[in-house]
Image (cartoon, rainbow, N blue to C red):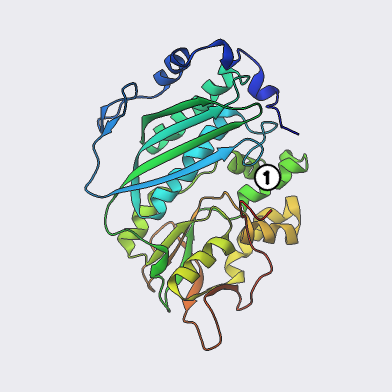
Amino acid sequence: MQRRPGPMLTEGTALRHLDEEEILARVLPFYGRPPSLVVPPGDDAAVLRTSDRTIATTDTVVLGRDWLDAWSSGADIGHKVIAQNLADIAAMGGRPTGVLLTLVVDPEVAIEWVLDLTRGIAEACSEADVAVLGGDLSSAPPGVVMASVTALGDLVAEPVLRSGARPGDHVAVAGSLGLSDAGLRLLQQGRPEADQEAVQVHRRPRPPLEQGVAAVEAGATAMLDVSDGLLRDGGRIARASGVILDLDPTALDEDVDRLTPALGVEVARACVLAGGEEHSLLATFPPGCLPPGWRLIGVVRGVAAGEGPDILVGGLREALTGWDHFRL
């Protein structure tokens, strides 16, 4: 059965009563024009001043898969889709500079929801000092609402890849662990009041964007953002680098304790180790190079005979995995 957008998306004037130019005339004033933007939205393409090496990434959120309108507003989705893209720029060691937006939407969705989405995007971009360069608007079959962002960024030095971790490095994280997954679980259980901060982080992730550049300057050897869970994303560093990441469970106790009152210790631990959509940064550093804003949570060691690259917790493999878009 096709899922229809709920009241949060449909209360107001349906998009089918407006043409594309009328919609854009109401959307574009939300976005400013920073000095780096030579040609603003409204032409066939924008023109942006960039460095000699530009980072590019893209991500999409889909109604019913990445959010439910029962508990996330248009502004929440605007913040979320910007955060997850800018976190990827930061994870490469870059500074975000601009975003391109695509909205594919059922014509029954209200212009008021689209403007709320636009407001959230504009707020998130303003907070990060990022230009909105333009994008595309398209209608969709009944029930389909999806927003996609392509983000650009400037490299400040050599990019930090997943493949650079070395035996003896320290594993560290900047930002929170498990809050977004905890917030999702509480929303699903109808108990958002049990931990309002976790719910807010799920609705509007807060990646530590400035720590990407800080990690580069401190000599980070590998880095990514925690979008699919600490174990799944840490495993990606392990496999790309051909090493073992061994996390210290005591270093994660504070994160687990933070969530235990609302969820119990076992669920709290699952959120910390496998919860997605946190968009904190995970990196490896040579000993003694950890910059302010990062905390040590493990070590990197070489692969012994009979082993393969892996991520462990206290020397043991976990049954927990993390988020996968296709294996539900």
Q: Quadrant of the N terminus?
A: top right
The residue lying toward the viewer, choosing from 53 and 96, is 53
Q: Work out whether 236 lies above or below 38.
A: below
Give percent across and percent down for residue 24: 44, 18
**In the current view of this chain or complex, which residue is farthest to the bottom?**
305
Q: Secondary structure at mark 1?
A: helix
Please report the residue visible at 25 percent of the width from the left and 30 percent of the height from the top: 35
Q: Work out whether 219 lies above or below 66.
A: below
Quarter holding residue 290: bottom left
Give percent across and percent down for residue 174: 47, 56
Give percent across and percent down for residue 264: 76, 57
Give percent across and percent down for residue 65: 64, 41
Q: Is residue 194 left or right of residue 25?
A: right
The residue lying toward the viewer, choosing from 241 and 157, is 241
- Residue type, numbered disc 1: Leu
Please report the residue visible at 33 percent of the width from the left and 46 percent of the height from the top: 95
Q: Is residue 72 left or right of residue 261?
A: left
Q: Is residue 320 left or right of residue 135?
A: right
Which residue has dot 1 on it? 184
